[in-house]
Amino acid sequence: ELLVEMLAGAGYNVLCACDGPSAVHVAATASPKINLLITNTRLRNMTVHDMVTNLQQHNSALRILYISGHLDENLAQLLSKHVDRVFLLKPFTRDALLRKINEVLF
């Protein structure tokens, strides 16, 4: 909820999902297409990799911002291979989040 408040307060149109399958559904019904996915690295009911793969099959221009309280080896390898995926370590400030979003989108 705090993340939604930060983004909406900065003027972003925010769509929310509570888990991977919900995110896939929200993205499939979104109009216009989603530009940026901000996701935790651990999800309920689906791996983050499976969710991102599914979403990018329908929207190849989708950018990814991963957030987490830790950076494990698997995520570090994934991030190093994909320039369109960026990581933000929790806790973070509103300004740090907005800078990362700018970095990912522009």
Image (cartoon, rainbow, N blue to C red):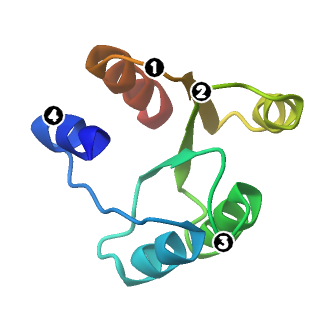
Mark 2: which secondary structure? loop
**Mark positioned earlier in the residue sequence (3 or 1):** 3
Frontmost of labels 4 and 2 is: 2
Mark 4: which secondary structure? loop
- Looking at the rendered image, the quarter that the C terminus falls into is top left
Mark 2 lies on residue = 69
**Mark positioned earlier in the residue sequence (4 or 3):** 4
Per the model, the C-alpha gap separating discs 4 and 1 is 19 Å
Mark 1 lies on residue = 91
Q: Which mark is residue 10?
A: 4
The percent position of residue 97, horizontal first and vertical second, equals 37, 25
The percent position of residue 92, horizontal first and vertical second, equals 41, 18
Closest to the observer, 32 or 73: 73
Instruction: Identify the amino acid type marked 3.
Output: Asn
Q: Does residue 48 appear left or right of residue 101 in this picture? A: right
Residue 91, compared with residue 82, is above or below; it is: above
Residue at 73%, 25% (x, y): give it. Answer: 71
Residues packed near mark 3 inside 10 Å, few (<14), some (14 to 19) or many (20 plus): few
Per the model, the C-alpha gap separating discs 3 and 1 is 24 Å
Q: Which mark is residue 45?
A: 3
Residue 6, compared with residue 27, is above or below; it is: above
Mark 1: which secondary structure? loop
Marks 1 and 2: CB-CB under 8 Å? yes
Instruction: Identify the amino acid type marked 2.
Output: Gly
Mark 3: which secondary structure? loop
Instruction: Identify the amino acid type marked 4.
Output: Ala
Q: Which mark is residue 42?
A: none
Residue at 88%, 29% (x, y): give it. Answer: 73
